[in-house]
Amino acid sequence: MGISFLPSPTFLGFLLFSFVTLSLHLEPALAITRHYKLDVMLQNVTRLCHTKNMVTVNGKFPGPRIVAREGDRLLIQVEVPIIFGEWFNADPEAVINQALQTGGGPNVSDAYTINGFPGPLYNCSAKDTFKLKVKPGKTYLLRLINAALNDELFFSIANHTFTVVEADAVYVKPFDTKTLLIAPGQTTNVLLKTKPHHPNAKFLMTARPYVTGQGTFDNSTVAGILEYEVSHNTIQSSHSTKKLPLFKPNLPPLNDSSFATNFTSKLRSLANAQFPANVPQKVDRQFIFTVGLGTHSCPQNQTCQGPNGTMFAASVNNVSFAMPTTALLQAHHFGQSKGVYTPDFPISPLIPFNYTGNPPNNTMVSNGTKLVVLPFNTIVELIMQDTSILGVWFMHCHLEVHTSWGLKMAWVVLDGKLPSQKLLPPPADLPKC
Ligand SMILES: [Cu+2]
């Protein structure tokens, strides 16, 4: 809250320091010691013929991954991460600031990226193509991360099938699919079985958005290439590898809601009779949250670019969240919530309507820093079933622009009775003002 990602030397030092302490704290007694050296620095990165100075880790964009081991558990070491991103030729901070100023939608990105590379379907980008090299007859675990700002993405590899085994850190009943759908902020692990023999072909892997709204969006397609390694005893020069046929996958139409619905309905808990998912049967508090896009009226003496001259806003239970200037956790801890937030977040929509039918005509939303305050260990029926973690917890949409427009709220979980159920004080060097 309130921390902007300014690459000042002090901040970078702090970041580096916190990584080091993190690794020390996570060190289980008998586990091996892993050493990471992370150099966070500003560096020039060029994509689509535009060079930008940006924060990189170990000279990479995106940075290297960190693996934390819990206890003595063994981790399988073939994990290939695939990170989807969005590339803006403009400064993304300026893009969102302009959108919030005018009330209109933000300018869209210029490209999507796979592990930082837009791929051959964009101008000035053929050299910046991510290549996944595989061997025949193997099973690879692909860890997919959607780090794009505002777009749900379809993803497919030509002539290959994925087996989805995990979504957002929860194992799922495995299912096969030729195309995945992944939302911003989501992660999923999938198994990729390669062909039993070298296929004498290369395969494009492509991603593009799933969009049903009416606003403008980046409708371009990012592509990487799946390549089979040639074993030494195969007589095939690198020259002939270049001539291999290249297959392209078929992605669903950009607005294919039936695919999206069908895909999400396949995400099922791995639970069975022997390993049940024990959902609490008795709840203390029940909440109904409606989320939506709405509008604020345009301030006088300004022209706005939202619907009918208004400003876009997003809300939960018709409240568009206004970010406080004092950190919520700080206000809560010191008992100084007055003027920062109010504990009156509505437990259900103020004006009930048919939640699966047409939305109400009035799109105006209210504005406020409203929170739900819960006693320690309250069992809540919403998406989360249990709240035994103390403190202040933001709940928000993962589409960046929706969050900026206010599609968020926060829960406060109060201290319990036992000493171990009290919120820890802030660090001694917390700035006083
Ligand atoms: Cu959203």
Image (cartoon, helix red, strand yellow):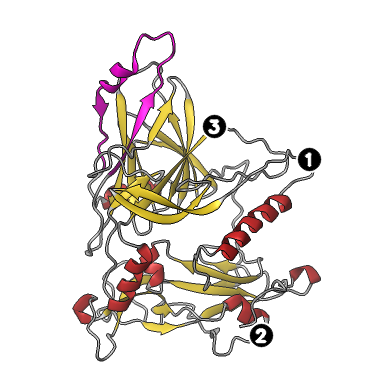
Q: Is residue 27 above or below residue 177?
A: below
Q: Which of 422/96 is in front?
A: 96
Nearer-the-camera pick, 218 or 349: 218
- Residue density around tag 2, few if under 14, some if 14–19, many if 20 or more, within 10 Å: few
- Identify the element where label 3 is drawn: loop
Residue pushed farthest left?
308
Residue in the picture at 43% in, 37% down: 175
For residue 421, above or below residue 64: below
Q: Residues within 10 Å of mark 1 (few under 14, many from 20)?
A: few
Instruction: Provide the residue span drawn in magenta.
Output: 222-251
Q: Is residue 218 visible?
A: yes
Per the image, the residue denoted by label 1 is 30
* Residue highlighted by disc 2: 335
Tell me the amino acid under the disc marked 3.
Val
Residue 260 image position (x, y, % from top left)? 32, 50
| Secondary element type, mark 2 | loop
What residue did someone put label 3 on? 78
Q: CA distance from mark 1 to mark 2?
A: 42 Å
Residue 262 visible? The answer is no
Q: Residue at x 19, y 79 (%)?
A: 308
